[in-house]
């Protein structure tokens, strides 16, 4: 299948990416050529094949439910764009 | 001293031929004078390097020198380094000073190494040419009109230009091995899970793996000794004992069974590359190995499967860059959605945005089975191909890349032609297998890489085979014309 301008706009919205209107055609062309590359998969029969998520089929390791992290709020917020009183600041969400 | 390998530098330090401070100063000076031609460093950490060198010299006097004591290395700029900018070569993280060290950074620090700085790369490790860096392209020391490969292009070019004796890299689809091949250096991607991913800026978490890049297999073994091992901070770290990768280097290769996949020597392979790889295989026969043709029938499917799985994981991993907690934030956002969209739209480059969109599309409602699940099924078929062949032979050999280094700009406007660059490398990431690229010849004045693929956790065997090849050949000692030492 082929993506048109509105598909690209919808995908960019889902991914929360601002794309310049002037660039949409070029994204749509390159996304279509990538999708036609990946569509080569569809010719292969994969019936009955188990999907592989981890090369060694490992499962999630568990640890004891203990506190292991010290509080590093100040160090971690030192690189934040905007903070106040230990909180991250964003534009007003609720009017 | 710029012609010395890491192992030779270690002996020089042990013998007192020079101090780590002298060595570090010499490399810092060399970077200052020469790196303008190659653009391999994003950040040079002169002050920290000299402090670490002095500490190493003191430790040596005190008799408690670690295994890499006083040896200079540099890190790809996606490994977090406390107090030092960690950019992933993106505008998004241009202002990001990491509050902590990646596990491999602290391990290499604890082994006594000296960090010269942070190396250029493709933005978020997405690329095969190092042209997508926010800090500009890296140039190949063998021909500065050519790309060094990617995404660890800064690492490979810095080692080739003798701006650092060794470097760290990361490999999600070939990002250690392909630039190693294009720049004539040695680089190993270990088995998935062998080296910790903690503090390595994530691209595709089920494929990402860090590894060393250096002039020789012996040097890679020394660095891998410090990097590898179980890490409770990485949820997919392999729970296995570490080993000393230097102990098996000198094992003879008599009786080694090598498989050559017929699919790797198709018409698409550059004739000069094919010839050099065949010569290298003949060298292994001289060393007592036997060679047989094998088949990896799903080779061509690895690119389509990879370009669903890697972008899908990337779109998820890169959703953390939201302009709120760290990294780039757009000016004057009108509301939260505008903050997210413009911070991400302005902070990410074109290829990164493209891959996020491919991934978001593949994971969106209604397409999951057709794309993501299908790709995961093909991933198992590709793994099964390797398992079958590695039951018959000890290792698989072939070209690392289908052609030598290409010109800057040659493929940058066509993502699909760029993706074909990784046809021989990304199947190993899908299968989780280790692979090493070793310089094995030249064509058109450019280096050619031989890829050696082994079974799970066979890093020691791969380094042994590469080391024996380097004892018998001198391709790894060639210095690019124009690189003065």
Image (cartoon, helix red, strand yellow):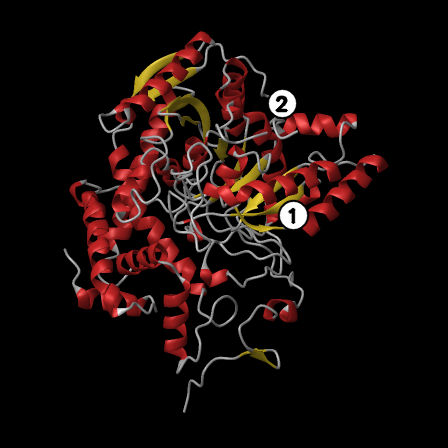
Q: Secondary structure at mark 2?
A: loop
Q: Quarter holding the C terminus of chain B?
A: top right
Is B398 placed above or below B346 here? above
Chain letter for mark 2? B
Seen at 57% across and 45% down, the residue is B75
Q: Position of residue A93 (x, y in %)?
A: 42, 84
Is there one chain holding both mark 1 and mark 2? Answer: yes
Q: Residues within 10 Å of mark 2 (few under 14, many from 20)?
A: few
Q: Position of residue B126 (x, y in %)?
A: 39, 49
The residue that mark 1 highlights is B106
Looking at the image, the residue that sits furthest to the left is A1
Task: Using the image, tell me which numbered label, if any, was put on residue B247.
Answer: 2
Q: Which residue is more in the foreground, A59 or A43?
A: A43
Q: Is residue B244 visible?
A: no
Mark pair 1, 2: CA separation: 24 Å
Q: Classify residue B244 by image quadrant.
A: top right
Q: Is residue B242 left or right of residue B174?
A: right
Q: Position of residue B293 (x, y in %)?
A: 30, 17
Q: Quarter holding the N terminus of chain B?
A: top right
Seen at 42% across and 60% down, the residue is B318
Q: Position of residue B381 (x, y in %)?
A: 29, 36
Is B354 placed above or below B408 here? below
Q: Which residue is more in the foreground, A88 or B444?
A: B444
Q: Counting residues from the N terminus, which is met first, the one under dot 1 or under dot 2?
A: 1
């Amino acid at each position: 299948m082929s993506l048109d301008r509105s598909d690209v706009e919808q995908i960019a919205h889902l991914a929360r990416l601002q794309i310049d209107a002037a660039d949409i055609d070029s994204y749509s062309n390159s996304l279509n050529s990538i999708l036609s590359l990946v569509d080569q998969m569809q010719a292969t029969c994969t019936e009955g094949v188990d999907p592989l998520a981890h090369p060694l089929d490992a499962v999630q390791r568990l640890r004891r439910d203990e506190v292991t992290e010290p509080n590093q709020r100040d160090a971690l917020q030192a690189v934040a764009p905007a903070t106040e009183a230990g909180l991250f600041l964003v534009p007003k969400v609720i009017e | 001293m710029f012609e010395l390998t890491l192992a030779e530098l270690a002996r020089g330090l042990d013998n007192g031929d020079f101090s780590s401070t002298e060595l570090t100063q010499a490399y810092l000076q060399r970077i200052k004078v020469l790196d303008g031609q190659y653009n391999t460093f994003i950040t040079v950490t002169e002050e920290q390097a000299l402090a670490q060198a002095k500490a190493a010299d003191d430790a040596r006097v005190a008799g408690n020198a670690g295994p890499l004591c006083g040896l200079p290395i540099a890190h790809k700029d996606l490994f977090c380094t406390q107090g030092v900018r960690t950019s992933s070569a993106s505008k998004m993280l241009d202002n990001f000073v990491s509050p902590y060290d990646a596990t491999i950074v602290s391990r290499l620090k604890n082994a006594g190494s000296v960090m010269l700085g942070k190396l250029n790369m493709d933005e978020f490790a997405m690329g095969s040419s190092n042209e997508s860096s926010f800090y500009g392209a890296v140039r190949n020391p063998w021909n500065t009109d050519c790309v060094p490969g990617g995404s660890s292009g800064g690492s490979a070019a810095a080692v080739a230009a003798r701006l650092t004796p060794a470097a760290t890299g990361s490999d999600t689809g070939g990002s250690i091995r392909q630039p190693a091949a294009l720049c004539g250096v040695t680089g190993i991607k270990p088995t998935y899970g062998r080296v910790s991913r903690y503090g390595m800026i994530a691209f595709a978490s089920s494929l990402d793996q860090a590894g060393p890049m250096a002039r020789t297999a012996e040097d890679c073994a020394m660095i891998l000794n410090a990097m590898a091992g179980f890490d409770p901070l990485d949820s997919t770290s392999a729970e296995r004992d570490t080993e000393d990768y230097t102990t098996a280097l000198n094992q003879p290769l008599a009786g080694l069974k090598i498989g050559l996949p017929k699919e790797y020597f198709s018409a698409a392979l550059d004739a000069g590359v094919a010839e050099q790889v065949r010569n290298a295989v003949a060298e292994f026969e001289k060393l007592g190995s036997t060679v047989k043709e094998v088949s990896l029938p799903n080779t061509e499917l690895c690119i389509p499967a990879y370009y669903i799985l890697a972008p899908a994981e990337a779109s998820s991993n890169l959703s953390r860059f939201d302009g709120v907690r760290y990294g780039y934030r757009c000016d004057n956002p009108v509301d939260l959605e505008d903050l997210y969209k413009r911070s991400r739209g302005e902070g990410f480059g074109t290829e990164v945005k493209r891959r996020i969109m491919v991934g978001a599309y593949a994971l969106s409602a209604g397409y999951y089975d057709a794309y993501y699940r299908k790709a995961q099924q093909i991933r198992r078929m590709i793994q099964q191909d390797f398992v079958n062949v590695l039951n018959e032979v000890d290792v698989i050999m072939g070209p690392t890349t289908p052609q030598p280094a290409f010109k800057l700009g040659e493929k940058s406007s066509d993502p699909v032609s760029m993706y074909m660059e990784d046809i021989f490398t990304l199947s190993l990431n899908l299968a989780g297998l280790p692979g090493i690229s070793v310089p094995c010849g030249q064509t058109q004045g450019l280096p050619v890489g031989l890829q050696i693929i082994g079974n799970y956790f066979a890093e020691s065997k791969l380094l042994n085979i590469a080391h024996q090849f380097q004892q018998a050949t001198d391709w790894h000692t060639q210095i690019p014309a124009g690189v003065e030492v």
